[in-house]
């Protein structure tokens, strides 16, 4: 009886760990898409009705929705990606994400669950030789399984910086 | 026979992985408590007899115990948290942790084991728009299971920086 | 039948997770060896015929092999380690790695597989009090199991920075 209970506990822990790992791998692929400027691959990581925004910690703490980017559907994300790919401003920089401290915040119900992770985006501008901290903050996420594939139904990127230098429209 | 041995090896690897994940999740919660300035939640992550200190790599390498913070019990940590919550110096900044490279360094014996992880704490001061590297270093830890819950019996935060700018007393 | 299939799927996911964790622990040990300047321990993490190089993203994107470091065997890595240990330039700095976003990119075939991870190396120079971003980039790896032990058969460290300040020859 104890053995059965022990096995059941371990199974629950294992299930939680496998889900954590799945999201961790999602975030690694998400970062790689942005770091390699594959913006249309990035768009495909969201659900059709996804919301994505990028706002300051100050606004988030005060319940103000205004931010650098505010998209209410995958179509809007696609427009954003298209605009960036065709903008001279976008090319001359490198971005590099480190995503860490991932936490799954709720049970998976009907294929949906909440998560959060800390992120750092480092940037190299082509007129400055060294890397700088571009954005530092938290992802507050809602994930949803669509036909077995994990997608973001919501990602709020809340950054600590007071200002984000000359790259207002680049997703993180 | 081979199958049984294979299964046993996998079980050991799985147990090690589950413990690693448990500590990784502990560290994510630890970072969130500090990043969100929930200092009393942070205090609860330590055992009653916990030691916590924050000292330079130079002093650590030379066996010198003097550091920015030196606490020898949970009560001392509580006093520290209380003082910070009531200090005007504390509020006007944001901190953000990334904790990575976690290693479990010993077997769990009587619910106690050693671990280490690298950490980066980034800071945004309210009179400077960009994030800076506040502290970079290593956590050297002793964890202990108390009533089934993981707590820190010891955390030594050894930082590489030669100076830590104007925030001497903030825990990391 | 379904249960058996479910178990098989979970076994595959678990095997993938265990391999991921093994590489993640390899990278943590790799980082610790370099951060603690145990360069000969670092050399032992490579196969006899290993290639190791450290080159800029610009050169990597353009298929140019020239970089800061180019080693084509473990012997060359050993020479590099020996030279650094006996060079006055090396000592007066601290390095600290954060390795994240690890992805296993191929199945293990004959004990060999590909992986990648993002890295940040922070540096403290002894004449500057604060930590700086020394190198930011990606490890593109080929791992090989030698007598059951994981080794690097190839590590290409591709950095985003346009310049790497006064530490040309230090491995990351």
Image (spheres, coloured by chain):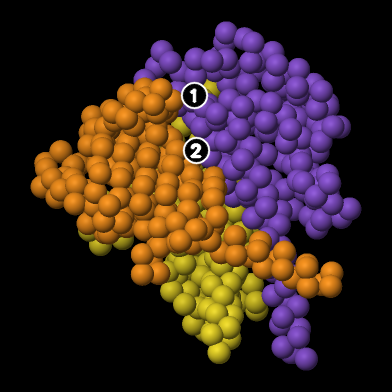
Chain colours: A yellow, B orange, C purple
Q: Which residue lies furthest to the front in this view?
A: B110
Closer-to-camera residue (C11/A158): C11
Specify whether disc 1 shares its chain with disc 2: no
**Mark 2 chain:** A
Residue placed under numbered mark 1 in the picture: C94
In the displayed structure, would residue A107 be above or below residue C143? below
The spot of residue B113 in percent (x, y) is 48, 53
Question: Looking at the figure, which quarter contains the N terminus of chain C?
Answer: bottom right
What label does residue B111 carry, if any? none
Closer-to-camera residue (B71/C83): B71
Closer-to-camera residue (A7/C6): A7
One can see residue C139 in this view? yes
B44 sits to left or right of B154 = left
Question: Looking at the figure, which quarter contains the C terminus of chain C?
Answer: top right
The spot of residue A135 in percent (x, y) is 42, 43
Question: Which of labels 1 and 2 is toward the front?
Answer: 1
The spot of residue C85 in percent (x, y) is 63, 15
A19 sits to left or right of C52 = left
Which residue is at a point 59% across and 80% down the rendered structure image? A7
One can see residue A22 in this view? no
B65 sits to left or right of A166 = left
**Mark 1 chain:** C
Residue placed under numbered mark 2 in the picture: A122
Which residue is at a point 37% across and 45% down the rendered structure image? B155
Callout 2 crowding tier (Cα within 10 Å): few <14, some 14–19, many ≥20: many
């Amino acid at each position: 009886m104890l053995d059965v209970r022990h096995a059941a506990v371990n199974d629950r822990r294992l299930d939680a760990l496998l889900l954590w790992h799945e999201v961790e791998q999602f975030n690694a692929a998400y970062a790689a898409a942005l770091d390699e400027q594959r913006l249309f691959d990035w768009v495909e990581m969201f659900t059709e009705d996804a919301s994505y925004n990028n706002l300051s910690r100050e606004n988030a703490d005060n319940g103000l929705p205004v931010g650098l980017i505010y998209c209410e559907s995958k179509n809007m994300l696609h427009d954003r990606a298209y605009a960036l790919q065709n903008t001279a401003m976008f090319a001359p920089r490198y971005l590099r994400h480190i995503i860490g401290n991932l936490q799954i915040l709720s049970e998976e119900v009907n294929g949906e669950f909440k998560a959060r992770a800390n992120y750092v985006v480092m940037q190299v501008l082509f007129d400055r030789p060294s890397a700088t901290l571009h954005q530092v903050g938290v992802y507050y996420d809602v994930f949803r399984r669509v036909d077995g594939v994990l997608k973001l139904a919501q990602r709020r990127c809340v950054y600590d910086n007071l200002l984000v230098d000359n790259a207002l429209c680049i997703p993180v």
